[in-house]
Amino acid sequence: MSYVDRMCLRLMAPCLLPALCGALLAWSAEGLLGLPRAAGAPDLPSYLIVAGGAASVALYAVQAGRLLRWRRGRGAACYVCGCLLGRAREGRWGVYRPCLGCGKQHGV
């Protein structure tokens, strides 16, 4: 696995989390709402799946935008491997940004 593949995996893997959480909530709501309910009551499990999918697509769009900016050379890049840098974090010796490819920590 190359550094670029690792960077793309670290960017795109969290995009599946909202969809999985929405499916899990829908499954549990279906079990809890399996009791008889009034006619005209909203179908909550299907709304939960749609909301989870929409959040997943929105997060994917944000990460794809970051990836496109990096490919055009407008994102903060690692000087070791050239991959995109993550968010700023507070560390022992000050603020740093980890590389999403090789994991090296760059001071801000």
Image (cartoon, rainbow, N blue to C red):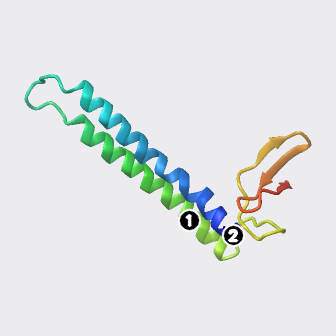
Q: Position of residue 72 (x, y in %)?
A: 65, 77
Q: Quadrant of the C terminus?
A: bottom right
Foreground mark, 1 or 2, reads 2
Q: Is residue 87 left or right of residue 41?
A: right
Q: Is residue 6 left or right of residue 41?
A: right
- Badge 1 local density, few (<14 within 10 Å), some, or many (20+)? few
- Residue at the spot 49% in from the left edge and 58% down from the top edge: 60
Q: Amino acid at mark 1?
A: Gly
For residue 76, the mark is none
Q: Work out how far the residue at label 1 is from the one at label 2, CA to CA, in angstroms.
A: 21 Å
Q: Is residue 60 left or right of residue 108?
A: left
Q: Are marks 1 and 2 in contact (CB under 8 Å)?
A: no
Instruction: Work out whether residue 31 or residue 79 is closer to the camera in this orientation and state it.
Output: 31
- Residue at the spot 82% in from the left edge and 50% down from the top edge: 96
Q: Which residue is mark 1?
A: 65
Name the residue furthest right: 93
For residue 2, the mark is 2
Q: Quadrant of residue 90?
A: top right
Q: Position of residue 99 (x, y in %)?
A: 76, 59
**Taking 1 as reference, is 53 above or below it?**
above
Q: Secondary structure at mark 2?
A: loop
**Taking 100 as reference, is 35 above or below it?**
above
Q: How many marks?
A: 2
Instruction: Work out whether residue 100 or residue 95 is closer to the camera in this orientation and state it.
Output: 100
Q: Quadrant of residue 23?
A: top left
**Taking 24 as reference, is 13 above or below it?**
below
- Residue at the spot 60% in from the left edge and 67% down from the top edge: 67
Q: Amino acid at mark 2?
A: Ser
Q: Is residue 95 left or right of residue 72?
A: right
- Badge 2 local density, few (<14 within 10 Å), some, or many (20+)? few
**Taking 7 as reference, is 91 above or below it?**
above
Q: Secondary structure at mark 1?
A: helix
